[in-house]
Image (spheres, coloured by chain):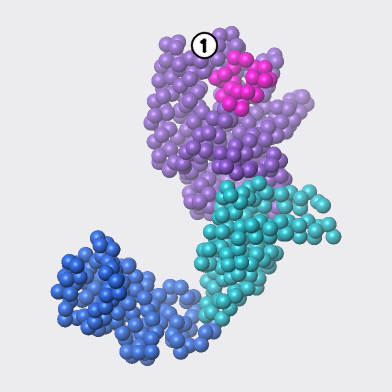
Amino acid sequence: MHITESVKGKLSNKITDWYEHSPKRIYIKAKPQDIKSIASVLFKDLGFRFIIASGCDTPEGIEILYHFSYDRMGLILSIRVLLKDKKKPEIESIAKLFPAAEWIEREIWELLGINFIGHPKLEHLLLIDEWPKGDYPLRHDRNNKGL
Amino acid sequence: MLKTFLNYLFFPGFLFSACIGLFAGWVDRKVTARIQYRVGPPWYQNFIDIVKLSSKEIIIPEGAKLTFLLAPFFGLLSTILAATILGKSLSVNILGFTGDLIVILYLLVIPAIAMIIGASSSQNPLASIGASREIKLVLAYELPFILSIVAVIVKSGGSIQLGRILNHQINLCSNIFSVSGALAFIVALLCIQAKLGFVPFDASEAEQEIMAGTLIEYSGLPLAVFKLTKAILLYTLPIFLIVLFMGNDMSLLFIMGKYLLILVLIILIKNTNPRLRIDQALRFFWGPLTFLAMVALVLAFFGL
Amino acid sequence: MSLKIKALTKSLWVFHAATSPCNNCDIEILDVLTPRHDAERFGITLVGSVRHADVLLVTGVPNYKTKERLKKLYSQVSRPCLVVAIGNCACGRIMFKESYNSPCPVDEVVPVDLYVPGCPPKPEAMIAGIIKLINKVKGKEKK
């Protein structure tokens, strides 16, 4: 389709894997250093809209998916980045590009422990402010207990 | 002296108007329920609400002065006085004094002012939003209301006594059967819809937006007094309209019929309209309605 | 039976205090107030301000933030006031018992008078629960 050809054309050197789950649902793998340039290409040049981000704790590392939508065709494009270092995961924040990403990055930080470099205000969103530092509830190696 | 006091308390004052007003409130709830295809509350529901409210604990917010407790009672006392004067002017040998129309007009503004004062002394930001909306609403609807009443005064030969207005209508014909009278009646009907605080003009007590607006901090007996004031207004205002516009036949059966007619009109307008924003309501009252009232006034001058 | 209790049971004003539920119970509470299972024939209406309320309908599992708000809400109601816990989450936290963000169930924050279990409870179950609550309040007085 027309828009997927443009995506492949503009980001060919940054995409490491391309998986089409269905004609309207595409997953791309990329490196964590490239996420800011990929996001700005998708938003400014191609007209995608940022929906939300999701974070997941997998055996290989912590994975973040950024979901973009092409509203004219109903196409949803998800970018997977894998952070291999589980002790100190870090990635660049895209909050300067999309103000919509501020709150979801705060939530991913406080529940999974990923440090977003360059985020304007990295504070607690859902948990109380007195939550102990270094305690990230959605990590798999933390047994499920309260405060 | 004692007779006047008993009139104020029992008939046609507090007890009589409160019972009829609470019953009319039940008619409103039942008809609304039937329109929405459900069964409504039983006939004693409003009475039970008042009894239950007067037995709950009264909570006074910190920093509220004495006006917080006094404001509802001023509203109630002035409304009962307006009901008494109106009832006395309808009795067989038509009593009253020159200017009692103006007195009733003044007395009917006081409940709205009591609500504004009560809301402003509540120390709550949501209540102050409700109070500012109520102030704007009062400014909006008082103008066309007074203009339509001036049209009636002009039609009755310039007299400002309720008894003379009634006499004029009994001798000639009801004010509503003339063009200017009909226009003035429509304007007055919409104005009392706003005075009673019914949809589409209840922006000051909007439940979903500002959590009961002006009455947010009231509980217990003062809240019961506010609800009682609303009920007595529901009795007083349609009777006021009947005296001004449909005063031809004042036998008991006809008064009840006309009262039910105005009540049905109010309920119909209430159930078929959404709520207006406060700037839309202001534009509505100062735009089309004032224009209609002035047309009615000009037509009344020419005797139409 | 005193007039106060009799008047209270015939005209219950309801306030909805949702402590971050999944909103299924809230939708079912809304169903009770709609024309199909009409609750206004019992005198029950929804009020906007917590000071006008007689019954607090609590849904959801309280977490650290909403626990404080629920305590404040309960202290702002004018007595006499009843508390109803609606849904499995409010009754006993069922599957969220070992979650990281739920310190205690609802009845350790406010005293509960009626539990309506179900996920979500049907509107008929809620109406049956209200009837049991009314009988309990009346029976307490009679003793």
- Does B300 sit above or below residue B64? above
In the rendered structure, which segment of residues is drawn in magenta?
A: B240-261
In magenta segment, residue B185: no
The three-letter code of the residue at mark 1 reads Gly
Q: Residue at x 55, y 34 (%)?
A: B267
Colour used to depict chain A in the structure image: blue
Tell which chain the image draws in purple. B
- Does C41 sit above or below residue C127? above
Q: Secondary structure at mark 1?
A: loop
Tell me residue C96's x, y (percent): 56, 76
Tell me residue B21's x, y (percent): 65, 34
Asked whether A100 or B257 is in front, the reply is B257
Tell me residue C101's x, y (percent): 52, 77
Quadrant of the snapshot with the N terminus of chain B: top right
Tell me residue C140's x, y (percent): 80, 60
Q: Residue at x 56, y 9 (%)?
A: B172
Can you identify the residue that label 1 sits on?
B157
Q: Residue at x 65, y 71 (%)?
A: C107
Q: Is residue B242 left or right of A1 when viewed as pictured? A: right
Q: Residue furthest front?
A: A22
Q: Residue at x 78, y 49 (%)?
A: C3
- Asked if residue A44 shows in the view, the reply is no
- Asked if residue A52 shows in the view, the reply is yes
In magenta segment, residue B241: yes
Asked whether A119 or B61 is in front, the reply is A119
Asked whether C23 or B100 is in front, the reply is C23
Tell which chain the image draws in cyan. C
Q: Is residue B237 left or right of A37 when viewed as pictured? A: right
Quadrant of the snapshot with the C terminus of chain B: top left
